[in-house]
Image (cartoon, helix red, strand yellow):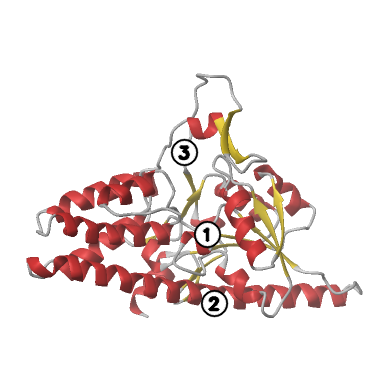
Amino acid sequence: MVSLNSIDDICNAIISMQVRGAPLIGLTAAYGFYFSFRENSTWDAFESVSNRLIQTRPTAVNIRWVIEKARDRLKNVNTGSLKAEALLLANELVVEDAQICKMIGHFGAKELQRLWDIKCKRAIEKGQPRPIALNVLTHCNAGMLAASSWGTALSPIYQATESIPIHVWVDETRPRNQGASLTCWELMQHGIDHTLVVDNAGGHLMQEGLVDCCIVGSDRATARGDIFNKIGTYLKALAARDNQIPFYAAVPMSTIDFNITDNYQEITIEERTGEEVRTISGVDSQGVVRFISIAPPGVKVSNFSFDVTPARLVTAIFTEKGIVEPNVREISSLMNN
């Protein structure tokens, strides 16, 4: 359990990834304004707090989205009411996020149902037994632990399991192992069949016909559908394309950077400390978290947090307003719905 009681706590929790996942990072940042105004109830603090929040995770666009929401909502509020109004806004965004994630799951589950129907039909045509399950591969953690509830990439799975059998291949997701520690935990809590695999197993599973589709979340998406997600996502998309397997991204509109239509190279890709790669953490038999070195001391490390999956490798994007193809025209149309 993490206790957050100040803007310093908020920033430290985001930087250390005690709070992670695009929607939850944004929601946590929203409460940062409340804590800031509690300490200094003047508008002067707004810009400095905004800059601090942006620097915590520079690739995550949800922080910028929250800042603009807060600016529009609070800029004309009298000084004495800033703290209360900031808290009200943050609470409203939590409720809104839950509904957004639920709708992403609603539309995504329909697509999973369609894939299941196709899989069953093909089995019948070939005189084969009914399939056991629809096999979905996911990378990192984009579930309830990364949002207020439901999550993004896991929301379609949660909702689809009400009507079809699903099995999930869970990438361990080095170096912080969010898949192994978080996604597996979530799926166990929901009783959803799943199997943990090493990060480099995805291509082999696809070649063997053991993956029906991939679903990932996103920390940022461009207006044409390029997906910034946990490092390793791009390789899964390449393997999926080579094996004619649908590759989906579950993306709230708050995660879409509508200002970037083509040159995604201008977006900063966060680099984290090399210690995340040199060491691995886990809980020992006594329940104590320990860090173990897995590389020679002092070895040089490159540790990019995200990579970019080009829109051409993305089959479709699940949003709270529906499913769209990854192109500027379709994604821009979401603004008018």
Quarter the C terminus occupies: bottom left
Q: Which residue is mark 3?
A: 304
Q: Nearer the viewer, residue 216 or 44?
A: 44
User: Based on the displayed image, in which of its 4 quarters is residue 335 positioned?
Assistant: bottom left
Q: Which residue is mark 1?
A: 142
- State whether residue 256 is above or below residue 125: above
Residue 88 horizontal/vertical position (percent) = 25, 72
Q: Is residue 109 left or right of residue 6?
A: right
Q: Nearer the viewer, residue 78 or 99?
A: 78
Residue type at the position of mark 2: Phe
* Label 1, label 3: how far apart the Cα atoms are: 19 Å
- State whether residue 335 is above or below residue 283: below
Q: Nearer the viewer, mark 2 or mark 1?
A: 1
Neighbor class of circle 2 (other Cα within 10 Å; few <14, some 14-19, many 20+) is: many
* Label 3, label 2: how far apart the Cα atoms are: 31 Å
Element under label 1?
loop
Q: Which residue is mark 2?
A: 107
Q: Residue at x 47, y 42 (%)?
A: 305
Q: Mark 2 vs mark 1: which is more N-terminal?
A: 2
Residue 220 horizontal/vertical position (percent) = 41, 56
Q: Mark 1 vs mark 3: which is more N-terminal?
A: 1
Neighbor class of circle 3 (other Cα within 10 Å; few <14, some 14-19, many 20+) is: some
Residue type at the position of mark 3: Phe
